[in-house]
Image: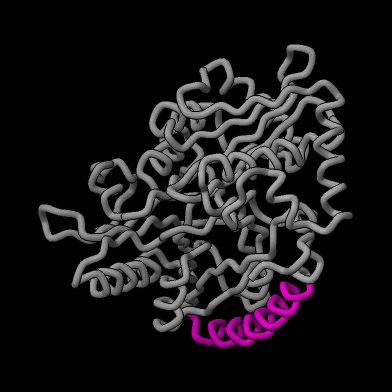
């Protein structure tokens, strides 16, 4: 069954489909995107989620969107669209299985463990492929999948694409200084110097969680986020209503870091907390303070993970500058099925070369890490 909005599914039934808490795949998060107008046909994201049920109970779900562009996905396929255009074929619309505007790895096939789990996944995938044909779409793309889903899709004729982000892993650190002790002397001094610059500037860093973030502070954060994103891209995809809705619906996930200077807030960084991970998502500032971005978006997040026993910190897409601060190259995966067999073969050959290049690049980047010995 294909849905035009996620509210056609009971929130408890949807959330019960995943055993591990991932904030971005929850009904509250996806519903907030739809209700706030961030995910609509007008924005190029048309919900077409698929669910499998036995009549009384939902057995599995696949969040899907019909797309008329490739923005907000963070797995870049513009060259594929251009190749279709050169061949006088239409690449758009396409269908993606992803969380809009969120390049974070997590479950995409929402199927709880059971003896029939494999059959349910296969049923969902077959329904998604049929939807591609029904909607006259060119292709189906599953973005930022977990390992077992990537394997499942590859075994069902999907093309595997390898990407790279920079993640931090908690190796049982007692505190931030214990973490820094694993750095070489030069890199350790650099981090301490950056943190010291923020302190010497007289900036106070405040960490708030959940319901501690008032409506007034959500407005403060949004002002910084809106201004920063608008300057960088000219388009702000997420609305204040979206963030206010998240604050009400899933406060247990919210971690907001604020910077205060002479009594006034000057910057903010918003992260979301999962079962054992922290996900850095949005940042903004009113002034350009030396090293403040590193403090709010990286160092305070690492400290938070250590203090709360979280195992990993994903601070967002891209950014080789993260390596010297303890975030190491980490593989991300997406899987792609193109209905046209000619393009499926051609893009498959291209991705084989791209994977080899990416593996080489990740090995080379790992050699530039700040650690005394390279972590596994």
* Residue 264 location, quadrant: top right
Residue 131 vs 219, above or below: the answer is below
Q: Residue at x 28, y 54 (%)?
A: 17
- Viewer can see residue 72: no
Eyeballing the image, is 320 above or below 359? above
**x%, y% of residue 343?**
56, 82
Q: Position of residue 170 (x, y in %)?
A: 59, 54
Q: Quadrant of residue 208?
A: top right
* Residue that extends furthest to the left in the rendered view of this protein: 56
User: Is residue 81 shown in magenta?
Assistant: no
Q: Main secondary structure of the magenta part?
A: helix
Give coordinates of residue 165: x percent, y percent: 66, 61
Residue at point 59%, 20% (across, down) = 219
Instruction: Look at the image and tell me in which quarter the N terminus lies.
Output: bottom left
Chain part drawn in magenta: 340-364
> In front here: 24 or 226?
24
- Residue 29 seen in this snapshot: yes
The type of colouring in the image is one colour
Q: Which residue occupies the extreme top position in the image?
A: 263
Q: Position of residue 376 (x, y in %)?
A: 63, 71
Does 201 sit above or below residue 4?
Answer: above
Query: Which residue occupies 63% across, 85% down?
Result: 352
The residue positioned 26% from the left and 58% from the top of the image is 51
- Observer-nearest residue: 113 or 301? 301
Q: Is residue 356 magenta?
A: yes
Observer-nearest of 254 and 229? 254
Count the numbered circles shown. 0
């Amino acid at each position: 069954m294909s849905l035009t909005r996620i509210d056609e599914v009971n929130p408890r039934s949807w959330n019960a489909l995943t055993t591990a808490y991932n904030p971005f795949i929850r009904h509250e998060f996806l519903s907030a995107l739809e209700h706030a107008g961030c995910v609509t046909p007008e924005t190029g994201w048309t919900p077409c989620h698929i669910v499998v049920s036995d009549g009384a109970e939902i057995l599995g779900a696949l969040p899907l969107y019909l797309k008329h562009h490739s923005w907000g996905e963070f797995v870049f396929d513009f060259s594929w669209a251009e190749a279709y255009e050169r061949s006088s074929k239409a690449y758009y619309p396409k269908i993606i299985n992803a969380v809009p505007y969120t390049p974070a790895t997590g479950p995409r096939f929402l199927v709880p463990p059971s003896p029939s789990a494999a059959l349910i996944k296969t049923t969902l995938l077959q329904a998604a492929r049929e939807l591609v044909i029904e909607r006259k779409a060119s292709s189906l793309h599953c973005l930022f999948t977990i390992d077992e889903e990537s394997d499942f899709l590859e075994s069902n004729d999907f093309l595997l694409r390898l990407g790279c982000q920079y993640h931090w892993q908690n190796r049982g650190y007692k505190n931030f200084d214990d973490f820094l002790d694993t750095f070489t002397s030069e890199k350790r001094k650099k981090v301490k110097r950056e943190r010291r610059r923020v302190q010497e500037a007289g900036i106070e860093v405040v960490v708030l969680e959940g319901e501690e973030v008032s409506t007034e502070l959500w407005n403060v954060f949004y002002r910084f986020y809106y201004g920063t994103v608008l300057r960088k891209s000219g388009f702000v995809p997420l609305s204040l209503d979206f963030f206010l809705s998240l604050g009400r619906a899933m406060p247990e996930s919210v971690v907001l870091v604020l910077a205060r200077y002479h009594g006034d807030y000057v910057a903010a960084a918003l992260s979301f907390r999962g079962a054992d991970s922290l996900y850095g998502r949005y940042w903004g500032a009113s002034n350009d303070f030396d090293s403040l971005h590193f403090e709010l978006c990286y160092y305070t997040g690492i400290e938070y993970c250590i203090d709360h026993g979280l195992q990993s910190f994903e601070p967002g897409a891209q950014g080789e500058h993260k390596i010297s601060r303890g975030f190491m190259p980490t593989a991300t995966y997406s899987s792609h099925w193109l209905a046209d067999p000619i393009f499926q073969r051609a893009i498959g050959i291209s991705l084989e070369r791209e994977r080899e290049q990416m593996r080489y690049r990740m090995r080379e980047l790992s050699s530039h890490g700040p650690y005394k010995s390279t972590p596994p």
